Amino acid sequence: MNERAPAQDCRGPSAHRGKMAGRPKKFDMEQALDAFVDVFWTKGYQGTSVDDLQNAAGIKRGSFYAAFGCKDDVFNSVLEKYWNEATALGLKQMDAEADPLKAVAALVRHVGIFMTKNTPRGCLLLTSSGALLNEKGDGDNPVRARMNTLERRIHDALTRESGLGNEAKAREVTAFALACLLGLNALARNGQDHGKILAAANHAADCIENSPD
Amino acid sequence: MNERAPAQDCRGPSAHRGKMAGRPKKFDMEQALDAFVDVFWTKGYQGTSVDDLQNAAGIKRGSFYAAFGCKDDVFNSVLEKYWNEATALGLKQMDAEADPLKAVAALVRHVGIFMTKNTPRGCLLLTSSGALLNEKGDGDNPVRARMNTLERRIHDALTRESGLGNEAKAREVTAFALACLLGLNALARNGQDHGKILAAANHAADCIENSPD
DNA sequence: TTAATTTTTGACTACTCAGTACAGAATGCC
DNA sequence: GGCATTCTGTACTGAGTAGTCAAAAATTAA
């Protein structure tokens, strides 16, 4: 564990143009972060080394640590960026649908498409959740926290205003939907082809929409 | 990559009692293998070092390599042992059921129980499949091969004698069932409690049994 | 007792990794 | 120009890793 501050100044070429003293950065923080997302996404948390990150962004050791902090700091930043983008794409579809079961079904359907687009990478968040367990034990971690958020969002979608009165069923569907998302992701990462994943996603969505009581 | 032979003689204390020359083994091959299963199961493929394996079995470096070969050899042995045991427990339940959809539902229900028993470890096979992708790329690997076998078994269960006439539906349900299994596993490894996992498994099984056409 | 055989043991090589340290380069400000 | 500031590049530390090797120990066979 390392307690250094991750150097949150973030001026660099892309930051606001009020010129400041000192040698200017040769790289763009945002572009570098994009590259980091890519590396973690394809290689997984455990599989990426700091060298991988540096090479991907074309940054040498010293600059890297000064600008981004340690590996875990970078991973947190990457997760934040990815989570925001993935949320924007996926969860909003769920919130737009009025009928609770249809809303969750829409989420699952969208995730199917999302996974298909990115085979065999699947979803960075869902994939990392398993890997972090091996690395850090089952304590709190940034992935787990976001998984809980995701779960809460699904549960909320099921129980808001016009929602399911039956709390037990809401919980069951929530757990099932979560399992479907994780399952579709695992399917994608197992190299299943587009057709199969989409079929499974559609089937899952249909199942949720026609949920048995 | 290392091409040494994994020393497949396997006499040791537990083998047949025709005494042979040479210093006797101090450890039992089967017990050691059990310990290896345990380590890979809790730490994952990437997360376990050869030292971990040696410590778990109380074997020193040289002896380890002489008896079991390299890390990948050990992993293959572990996978074989685990697969046989998991198959004996899980797939036979599926084969015992005549109705195709009920058979697959039975498998999913059983997996739910299995995952619950082993939280937060889940299933060694399903868990490793994602990790190996990061490590080895998407080429052939021993996990992938067994995943394909699993998929084929599910598809067979759906299409044997009295089975579904509709091939498209069979494929859809197969992919969905696989997604459910992987999803339940991921759920378990995300630290979800017993109740949630069982609920999700039951819901999934119900969905499969009442599969929409 | 001696030879043959096999395992044990610990040292050894060679490599990768995360993170630190520091001299020097490039800039803005005065 | 001179100075403070910030970034770059590289070398370094220390820990971990996989796998090899040869000498010592334990056993059976002759």
Image: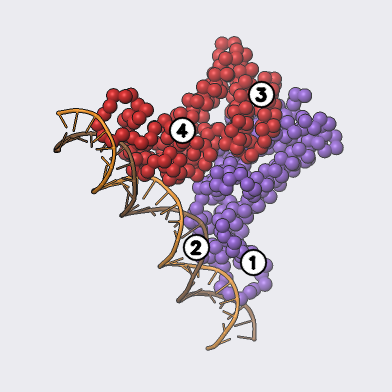
Chain colours: A purple, B red, C brown, D orange
Amino acid type indicated by mark 1: Asp
- Front one among A95 and A71: A71
Amino acid type indicated by mark 3: Ala
Disc 1 residue crowd, few under 14, some 14–19, many 20+, Cα 10 Å: few
Is circle 2 on the same chain as circle 3? no
* Mark 4–mark 3 distance (CA, rounded to whole Å): 31 Å
| Chain ID of residue with mark 4 | B
Name the image quarter holding the C terminus of chain A.
top right
Pick out the residue farthest to the top. B162
Residue topped by disc 3: B205
**Percent coordinates x, y for residue C23 in the rendering:** 45, 76
Name the image quarter holding the N terminus of chain A.
bottom right
Disc 3 residue crowd, few under 14, some 14–19, many 20+, Cα 10 Å: many
* Mark 4–mark 2 distance (CA, rounded to whole Å): 42 Å
- Front one among B26 and B180: B26
For the residue labelled by badge 3, is the local secondary structure a helix, a strand or a loop?
Answer: helix
Disc 2 residue crowd, few under 14, some 14–19, many 20+, Cα 10 Å: few
Residue topped by disc 1: A9
> Label for residue B34?
4
Is circle 1 on the same chain as circle 4? no
* Mark 2–mark 1 distance (CA, rounded to whole Å): 18 Å
Which residue does the image show at 52% across and 37% down from the upper left?
B41
**Percent coordinates x, y for residue A94 in the rendering:** 75, 39
Residue topped by disc 2: A61
Is circle 3 on the same chain as circle 1? no
